[in-house]
Amino acid sequence: MSIRPWRDIARRQSRQIMVGNVPVGGDAPVTVQTMTNTPTSDPVATINQIRRCEEAGADIIRVSCPDTDSTAALAKITKAARVPIVADIHFHYKRALEAADAGAACLRINPGNIGSSERVAEVVRAAKANGCAIRIGVNAGSLEKDLLEKYGEPCPEALVESALDHIKLLQDHDFHEYKVAVKASDVFLAVAAYQGLAEATDCPLHLGITEAGGLIGGTVKSSIGIGSLLWFGIGDTIRVSLSAEPEEEVRVGFEILKALGIRNRGVRVVSCPSCARQGFDVIRTVQVLEERLQHIRTPMSLSVLGCVVNGPGEARETDIGVTGGGNGKHMVYLSGLTDHTVEDADMVEHIVKLVEAKAAELEAADVAKAAIAAE
Ligand code: SF4
């Protein structure tokens, strides 16, 4: 039993599917996705962007395939990518067939939008033959006409009904490797729709607040929407949609998971807003540290506080801590205990070195643990 029951999240039990070699749903870790914005027909630019997203930690990456030039380039892209690639298709079912043949691990396509049942059968055949999953993506902005007429406006019931209609088409063709999203830019609508869908089906759910906005506004909306659902135990994979570079979406996605203790990656920074008591420039120091520590993947924590008011308390709970002191001399804590002091000028370099050393130590401990478990 957890000693901190107020932190427990009871996760909805979903069916697990595979997107390439990445499990989604069931007891698999909640995965973080993003989407490229380079022309897919330019494989070099797209692969370069995929690399940056992989470095940021993306588990799955989606690319749009609006035309044959894109699906022609897709084979090179899927071969170069280290993570599974989802091909985003709208309406043109032939692009789906080409994408499946080009190595896409998943097709994002709504079977209800591609015309006849024979076309759905063809897409399902291609998906089965190539081991592709399918992601159904219902969006409040493009709901089917009949549902809009029935409900009068996009509402949670309409989004869920649309999703269930698409799901039925796949099930009728005996296809079950699918996950579903019911996105809306309105947080209330999206959350209510996902809650309804979570009750109505056991398939894995892909969470997102669509068209959420720029880096700050979109992060806030996504954190409330995706964060609430995850807190309710709903959601198996997430994509934060921002009018910002895809790497930023990945970073924000991980920050949401870290804040809820669902999944940790890299350095979790605890820092104060600073005030007149600060012993060093907290804001600038944290900005530089966040940039310099992006390469760290090992989960660990770092507290950076401007003075002794809250510094020692936070340092006790983190792997490495620094608390501002007088005369440009600041206290460094290791594993919660006071250890040594550092001067203003050396602080950033010093903390980066300490974090890198701690990450190496934690990694070595993990390797040793795994070796003992394997014996
Ligand atoms: S920790 Fe100190 S410097 Fe930071 S906000 Fe609190 S009182 Fe101000």
Image (tube, helix red, strand yellow):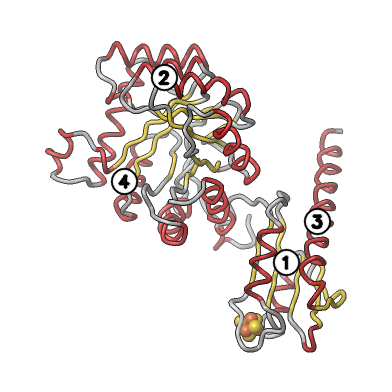
Asked if disc 4 is less than 8 Å from ligand 1, the answer is no
Can you tell which mark lies on residue 193? 4
Instruction: Tell whether label 3 touches label 4 (CB within 8 Å).
Output: no
Among numbered discs 3 and 2, the one appearing first in the sequence: 2
- Inter-mark Cα distance, 3 to 2: 45 Å
Among numbered discs 1 and 2, the one appearing first in the sequence: 2
Front in this rendered view, residue 274 or 127 = 274
Among numbered discs 1 and 3, the one appearing first in the sequence: 1
Instruction: Tell me residue 178's x, y (percent).
Output: 43, 27
**How would you rate the neighbour count of disc 1 (Cα within 10 Å): few for under 14, some for 14-19, many for 20 or more?**
many
Asked if disc 2 is less than 8 Å from ligand 1, the answer is no
- Label 3, secondary structure: give it: helix
Can you tell which mark lies on residue 318? 1
Name the amino acid, label 2. Answer: Thr
- Inter-mark Cα distance, 1 to 2: 51 Å
Q: Quadrant of ligand 1?
A: bottom right
**How would you rate the neighbour count of disc 4 (Cα within 10 Å): few for under 14, some for 14-19, many for 20 or more?**
many
Which of labels 3 and 2 is toward the front?
2
Q: Which residue is mark 2?
A: 68
- Label 1, secondary structure: give it: loop
Instruction: Tell whether label 2 touches label 3 (CB within 8 Å).
Output: no
Residue drawn at point x = 31 percent, y = 25 percent = 91
Can you tell which mark lies on residue 356? 3
